[in-house]
């Protein structure tokens, strides 16, 4: 085990709001072993930015890790050439050109269709009624699982997210995760024969065309659903919440002074939807006086890095004037999120501008005070709002 200083946390408080504890770690014990998580945490942005690239030390290959055990050895749990082979295979489905030429029109149509119904209602929960279905509709077409309903896409994503963050070992959470991965496998089984006959640009199809083994294809589809549903869902809802609770900044956005792309980047920095990425220590290594031993478990705390006082001014506040260039919301090394272009397009170019354009006088429900939760993955669970119905 590493010789990092030991820091204890209250798991419930950390789930509710990890930022106070992470701020103390950054200030006093930036590399700390947390017994409640059985992991050594890197909390400063520069340490993460530098060391994430050292894949010979901070390895993504984790045969006994929760993601590998529950979802299979996907490309995020491979390094170097093994990682690049699979990344190259999926690139045609998520490249900037494919996003622009193939997926954007479908993103726009899905968001418009969902808003057609919402406009007439005058109120609703914008997590369940907007962010979730918009994210799910986009993911259905990108993955190729167009046979999966939006609610099931969301359920299976959340079940896997809960499963791979289940460091307390709750057997009920693990059982739900297994049920969700089995559902995804059934939907893959249905689509494979159809895509063999009629290939398209979806993740499932391009991996089949590239000749990847079926086990790898299935694991990568599960990876795409786990992150590709919850992250856009949480940023769509969270960014709406951030603008509604910062009215002066909202007015500047609606006046065209600040682009929605900056809203996306600042929210993803301020409340990182993926707050942590795990690594396994492959060989003995020392960072800033802390020596890691082989097989140590390390958590790269992206959420902490994105509030590092050494990298950002007033990092604890949502401010569209921030320079977000140092943000590592999508990672910093070779495992930089492959779906970043699709996520940015869906959220910045479609979901946010359409919501504020179509939902007139959008506002929080009176008395509502929604707050994000989670530390490995963080987002709102509800966003009760009202608007002027058509």
Image: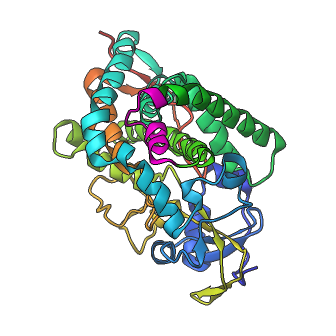
19 left or right, relative to 322? right
Residue at position x 21%, y 36% in the image: 254
Q: Residue furthest bottom?
A: 289
Magenta span: 196-211
Instruction: Name the foreground residue: 355 vs 241.
Output: 355
Residue at position x 53%, y 64% in the image: 82
Asked if one can make out residue 340 in the rendered structure from this viewpoint, the answer is yes
Where is 71 relative to 229, above or below? below
Instruction: Name the foreground residue: 227 vs 376.
Output: 227
36 left or right, relative to 389? right
- Looking at the figure, which quarter contains the N terminus? bottom right
Residue 176 placement (x, y as % from top left): 74, 35
Asked if one can make out residue 337 in the rendered structure from this viewpoint, the answer is no
Residue at position x 72%, y 63% in the image: 9
Residue 142 placement (x, y as % from top left): 42, 35
Where is 305 relative to 195, above or below? below
Residue 366 placement (x, y as % from top left): 46, 24
Report if residue 200 lies within the magenta region: yes
Where is 318 relative to 384, above or below? below
- Looking at the figure, which quarter contains the C terminus? top left
Report if residue 303 lies within the magenta region: no
What secondary structure characterizes most of the magenta part?
A: helix
Residue 91 placement (x, y as % from top left): 38, 50
């Amino acid at each position: 085990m590493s010789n990092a200083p030991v820091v204890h946390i209250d798991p419930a408080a950390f789930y509710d709001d990890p930022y106070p504890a992470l701020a103390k770690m950054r200030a006093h014990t930036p590399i700390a072993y947390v017994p409640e998580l059985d992991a050594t945490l890197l909390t400063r942005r520069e340490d993460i930015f530098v060391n994430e690239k050292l894949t010979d030390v901070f390895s993504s290959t984790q045969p006994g890790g929760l993601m590998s055990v529950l979802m299979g050895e996907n490309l995020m749990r491979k390094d170097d050439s093994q990682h690049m082979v699979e990344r190259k295979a999926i690139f045609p489905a998520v490249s900037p050109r494919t996003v622009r030429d193939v997926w954007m029109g479908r993103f726009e149509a899905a968001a418009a269709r969902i808003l057609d119904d919402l406009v007439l209602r005058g109120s609703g929960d914008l997590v369940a009624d907007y962010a979730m279905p918009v994210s799910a509709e986009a993911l259905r077409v990108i993955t190729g699982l167009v046979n999966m309903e939006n609610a099931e896409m969301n359920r299976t994503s959340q079940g896997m997210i809960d499963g791979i963050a289940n460091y307390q070992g709750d057997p009920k959470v693990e059982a739900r995760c297994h049920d969700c991965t089995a559902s995804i496998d059934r939907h893959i089984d249905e689509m494979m024969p159809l895509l063999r006959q009629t290939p398209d640009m979806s993740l499932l199809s391009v991996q089949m065309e590239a000749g990847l083994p079926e086990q790898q294809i299935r694991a990568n589809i599960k990876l795409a659903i786990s992150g590709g549903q919850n992250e856009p869902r949480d940023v769509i809802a969270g960014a709406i919440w951030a603008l509604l609770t910062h009215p002066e900044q909202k007015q500047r956005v609606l006046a065209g002074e600040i682009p929605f792309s900056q809203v996306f980047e600042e929210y993803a920095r301020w409340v990182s939807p993926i707050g942590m990425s795990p690594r396994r220590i492959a060989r003995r290594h020392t960072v800033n006086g802390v020596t890691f031993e082989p097989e140590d478990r390390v958590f790269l705390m992206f959420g902490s890095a994105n509030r590092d006082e050494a990298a950002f001014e007033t990092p604890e506040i949502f401010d569209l004037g921030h320079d977000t260039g140092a943000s590592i919301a999508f990672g910093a090394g070779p495992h930089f999120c492959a779906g970043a272009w699709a996520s940015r397009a869906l959220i910045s170019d479609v979901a946010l501008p359409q919501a504020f354009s179509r939902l007139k006088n959008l506002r929080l429900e009176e008395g509502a005070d929604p707050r994000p939760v989670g530390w490995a993955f963080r987002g709102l669970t509800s966003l009760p709002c009202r608007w002027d119905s058509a």
